[in-house]
Image (cartoon, rainbow, N blue to C red):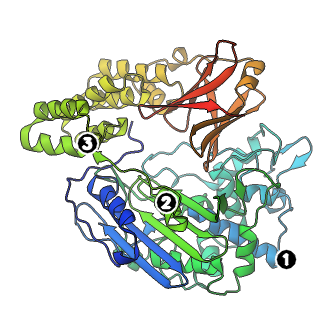
Amino acid sequence: MLKNLFFFLLVGALFCCQAQTKLSDEVIENIKLRIDNGKNPGIVIGIIDQEGTRYHSFGVKSLKTDEPVNEYSIFEIGSISKTFTGILLADMVVKGKLNLEDPLQILLPDGVKAPTRNGVSIKLVHMANHTSSLPRMPDNFNPANPANPYIDYSEKQLYDFLNSYELSRDIGSKYEYSNYAAGLLGHLLAAKNNTTYEELMLSVIANPLKMENTGILLTPEMSKHLATGHRGRIEVENWDLTTLAGAGAIRSSAVDMIKYLAANMGMVKTKLYPAMQLSHKNSRAEGAEPIVGLGWHTQVFDEEEIIWHNGGTGGYRTFAGFTKDGSKGVVVLCNSTTGADDLGRHLLYSKSPLNKIKSSIGAKMLQVIERDGLTAALDTYSELKKSPIDIYDFSENELNDLGYYFLARKELENALAVFKLNIENYPNSSNVYDSYGEAFMEKGNKEKAIENYEKSVAINPGNLNGLDKLKELGVDTNKLVTEIVVDEGILENYVGKYELAPGFILTVTRNEKQLNVQATGQPQFPVFPKSSSVFYYKVVEAQLTFNRNEDDKVESLTLLQGGRTMVGSKIE
């Protein structure tokens, strides 16, 4: 399945850094490994503190041109746009045009009714802090072009979904990250002002802050500086969020985003500062996790509080954050689907660890294939995996990405061989069979494609891509997925906190017959039963197994994701 792809660059790829003396050797080396080992084509970092503003640029705008990125390069900032939406709401509150406690219904047009539950209405604050009980995405979201999925989602679909949706839990009771809610809020705020979301955002935020290269529609100047988005070595389409613009449509540069952070931090005083301060303030009950304002999230470290948001679209990952005391702000922009949130957090709080970057086994195999052929590359993989020297990344995604690199180039035999090798190494992964099935579809081998897609769905019934492909191939998928109902008493035994690593905890909660899981610093997602003890995600290729001890008490869970297994002991 073409998801979570990384690209491959030969070691020694273009590495460019501006003003790198201001970054520690540890950070520079870590970024160099990301570039050289094929994690990111380009990374731009902006830092603002009491010493001033500085930028650090690494890598390229496009693998096809080798033109370096810089602080003026344009990136899709994705869900960081939600903080703009939060500030737009806060600005209207500060001006007395709205109240956070106002019901959503007051902004809706005639004929559209917001759902209620137990006589309680969704309030505007719930829309901005992800507690509205509206889902992450609407069920009528069926893009004609998955490469640009939001472009054809219409206003009619937006309101049709709202009119028909039945809330599954009490409003305000749980945090569930919702692109739909943020997009709807942005759309309604613009409508109240008789304008578009982009025009509202520009007039209230970007123009007053002199963010000259920030917007949704690309101006000629922005197009000139656009850093191309990537999945693997493959360039991808830009995303165009129309109706749901408030959830993630904005494009910007490091220069403009530093202006945005400076205003939020109060380093540059503007008329927007009171609204920005309101958007940072915790809008949830005291002690509720995660801490959320209006769009912005707050992460608490031992000695520091960071206000932040990240973003991701089809070919970009971004991070923006600042210390609560306003002393330092950081933006990190990447033109690939591999993010660098850890870099942003580390630059704000030095005790927050950087991800360990290993050499790409995919890049190594590509190098050997181009020089010595496929057989030699397969032998190299086997030899290096047996080696006691742990310097290569042998994760499932490495081979998956290499296979898609060959698939995009129509080198089907290479693609099939690489995907087959991935199956041999990760036979319990739904994703590897999905990818193998796609390669057989490309080759025209319908029988083999069906065989592998069915194996993929058997491992993970939530693989919607596999189910869709099987339908295209004429398979009756109703026979493949059986709904399993687990007794609520059993589900209740799974509720608790499980520590997979120091500081990294999975919190399992229950809403009637639905289990939900939230990882530290991440949104909450539902999981679905494959059996009474095994559950799978639909939003990501991952599976949880709850483990019992000899006394039949749940003592741990096992997370299987990307071919890797992690066991977390139950601590609460």
> Quick one: label 3 or label 1, which is nearer the N terminus?
1
Q: Which residue is mark 2?
A: 240
Label 3 is placed on what type of residue?
Gly
In this view, the mark in front (3 or 2): 3
Q: Is residue 320 left or right of residue 364?
A: right
Instruction: Name the residue at the right extreme.
Output: 119
Q: Amino acid at mark 1?
A: Gly
Please tell me whether residue 533 is drawn above or below residue 186 in the rendered image.
above
Residue at 20% across / 54% down in the picture? 11
Q: CA distance from mark 1 to mark 2?
A: 32 Å
Query: What amino acid type should be assigned to the residue bearing mark 2?
Result: Asp
Residue 362: mark: 3
Percent x, y of residue 327: 60, 77
State the residue position of label 1.
96
Labels 3 and 2 touching (C-beta < 8 A): no
Residue closer to the observer: 111 or 267: 267
Q: At which x and y percent is residue 183?
A: 64, 57
In the image, what residue occupies the spot 34% across and 64% down?
Answer: 42
Q: Earlier in the sequence, mark 1 or mark 2?
A: 1
Quadrant where the C terminus lies?
top right
Q: Is residue 39 left or right of residue 459?
A: left
| Residue for point 78% across, 60% down | 283
Query: Which comes before the other along the chain, label 3 or label 2?
Result: 2
Q: Secondary structure at mark 2?
A: loop
- For the residues labelled 1 and 2, say whether their Cβ atoms are less than 8 Å apart: no
Q: Position of residue 6 (x, y in %)?
A: 35, 48
Tell me the distance, in whole angstroms, between the alpha carbons under discs 3 and 2: 31 Å
Quarter of the picture holding the N terminus: top left
Instruction: Quote the CA–CA distance across marks 3 and 1.
Output: 56 Å
**Element under label 1?**
loop
